[in-house]
Image: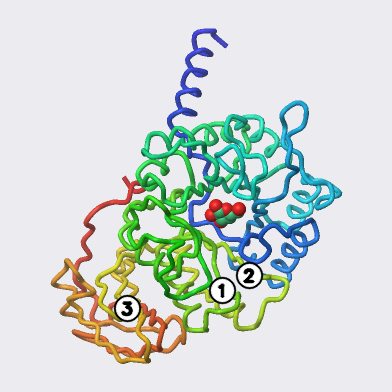
């Protein structure tokens, strides 16, 4: 090879590496899987994680897209070793992390790891700040497929988007440098507006403080009801997170997703209606769908919710990211456009009031910008009951249970020659 050509290729490769930091080809659709934290917190070990991986497989959840088994905080010793590497806790993991990864891979699943862009993790184990390359190398050696990267103990390195970007970008680069595709799941709780700067370095970013297993409640530990928040906190209810996430969908695109936090489906407290609502909106806004229940004890009802193929399709299929049409005192209307030219649209009506109710959804509130589309009829299918609701014109009437959701797919019902043109108002970044 001519030396000049070699150096040109090397320079190009370096340039590509530095400009396409998040281009690891992963999370083309929002990642799906299971994480230890919501059920087990720090009580994890090889048995809990392998047991969960086997349960995921036995329940055939992998066939619905649930792929990653993610180990959260509290897996390491409190000290790095003499050469500065993280050490796993040998009591929790007697055969080591590589062995755990091998077992999970043998099941055909991906293995997720956790660290923090801080001196310590939130559980006060060593964090990766200033050790990014060492830790990324170790994770790659253990054949990790996914890194959840937290924000605790960041030693004041936050407060402006650029400060946070610089801190998180170091790990992005370190992961890429390993040569192993590792999904990069940022967890800085929406601090410094990650939706503005994370898409070029990460596959997803948390946009809120931690979720709690409560439908709707103000809690001083999660003081913000807006997405710009100086204290994201924890104990954020499902409706609190939904309200914060509503305007952010426009920032998500292929390989770069808003993360509304792990699912609370199958944990105590939320009723059946609340869980269906939670799952539907997480899928529609294309949040990662990471289960957080005790998967080894999954009930029939939990499985039924988590495996609703029509709802999963809203996350993984050919649909744009959902947006909210309106928010009233006791209801919200959400919309999700098909990405093809079919003109299909998904309409979701949330009833966050305290009684079952009847709602009329006017086409003006569905076809916000396209007058012609308001004039034709649509076939409606309920994506939870699978009922065919016939053809509707001008408006759609639905009954929605207290704290429940109606999710319906509308498909053009008339003579194809009369079908109104579907306009495209703006291309998503991946389509440019
Ligand atoms: C929080 C994070 C949680 C969990 C926890 C572990 O900061 O948002 O999802 O990872 O730390 O300590």
- Choose the circle earlier in sequence order: 2 or 1: 1
Q: Is mark 2 within 8 Å of ligand 1?
A: no
Residue projecting furthest to the front: 220
What residue is drawn where x is 52% and y is 44%? 25
Distance between the alpha carbons at the discs numbered 2 and 1 = 7 Å
Label placed on residue 293: 2
Distance between the alpha carbons at the discs numbered 1 and 3 = 27 Å
Task: Point out residue 265 in the picture as x, y percentages from the top left corner.
Answer: 56, 73
Where does label 3 land, which residue? 410
What residue is drawn where x is 37% and y is 60%? 224
Label placed on residue 144: none
- All told, the count of numbered labels is 3
Q: Secondary structure at mark 1?
A: loop
Question: How many residues crowd mark 1 within 10 Å: few (<14), some (14–19), many (20+)?
Answer: many
Q: Quadrant of ligand 1?
A: bottom right
Q: Is mark 3 within 8 Å of ligand 1?
A: no
Relative placement, left or right, of 137 versus 168 is right
Relative placement, left or right, of 358 versus 219 is left
Relative placement, left or right, of 119 versus 203 is right
What residue is drawn where x is 43% and y is 39%? 158
Please tell me which residue lies in front, 210 or 271: 210
Circles 2 and 1 in contact, beta carbons < 8 Å: yes
Question: How many residues crowd mark 3 within 10 Å: few (<14), some (14–19), many (20+)?
Answer: many
Where does label 1 land, which residue? 265
In the rendered image, which quarter contains the C terminus?
A: top left
């Amino acid at each position: 090879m001519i030396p000049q050509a070699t150096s040109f290729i090397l320079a190009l490769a370096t340039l590509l590496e530095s400009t396409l930091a998040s281009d690891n080809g992963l999370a083309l659709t929002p990642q799906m899987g299971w994480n230890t934290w919501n059920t087990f917190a720090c009580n994890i070990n090889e048995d809990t994680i392998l047991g969960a991986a086997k349960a995921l497989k036995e329940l055939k959840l992998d066939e619905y897209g649930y792929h990653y088994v993610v180990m959260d905080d509290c897996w390491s010793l409190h000290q790095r070793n003499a050469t500065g590497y993280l050490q796993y806790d040998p009591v929790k993991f007697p055969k080591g992390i590589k062995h755990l990864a091998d077992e999970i891979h043998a099941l055909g699943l991906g293995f997720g790891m956790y660290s923090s862009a801080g001196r310590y993790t939130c559980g006060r184990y060593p964090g990766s700040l200033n050790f990014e390359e060492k830790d990324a190398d170790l994770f790659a050696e253990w054949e990790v497929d996914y890194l959840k990267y937290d924000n605790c103990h960041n030693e004041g390195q936050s407060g402006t988007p650029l400060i946070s970007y610089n801190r998180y970008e170091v790990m992005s680069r370190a992961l890429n440098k390993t040569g192993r595709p590792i999904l990069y799941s940022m967890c800085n709780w929406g601090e410094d507006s990650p939706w503005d700067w994370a898409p070029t370095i990460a596959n997803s970013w948390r946009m809120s403080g931690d979720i709690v297993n409560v439908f709707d409640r103000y809690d001083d530990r999660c003081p913000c009801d807006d997405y710009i928040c100086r204290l994201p906190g924890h104990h954020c209810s499902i409706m609190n997170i939904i309200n914060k996430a509503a305007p952010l969908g426009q920032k998500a695109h292929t390989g770069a997703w808003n993360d509304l936090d792990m699912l609370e489906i199958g944990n105590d407290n939320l009723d059946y209606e609340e869980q269906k609502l939670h799952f539907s909106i997480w899928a529609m806004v294309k949040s990662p769908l990471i289960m957080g229940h005790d998967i080894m004890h999954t009930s029939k009802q939990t499985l039924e919710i988590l495996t609703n193929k029509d709802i999963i399709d809203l996350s993984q299929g050919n649909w744009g990211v959902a947006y909210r049409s309106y928010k009233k005192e006791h209801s919200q209307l959400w919309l999700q456009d098909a990405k093809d030219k079919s003109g299909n649209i998904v309409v979701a009506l949330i009833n966050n009031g305290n009684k079952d109710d009847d709602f009329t959804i006017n086409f003006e509130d569905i076809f916000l910008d396209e007058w012609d589309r308001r004039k034709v009829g649509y076939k409606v299918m309920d994506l939870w009951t699978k009922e065919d609701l016939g053809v509707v014109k001008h408006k759609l009437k639905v009954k929605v249970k207290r704290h429940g959701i109606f999710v319906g797919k509308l498909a053009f019902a008339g003579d194809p020659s009369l079908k109104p043109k579907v306009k495209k108002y703006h291309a998503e970044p991946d389509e440019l």
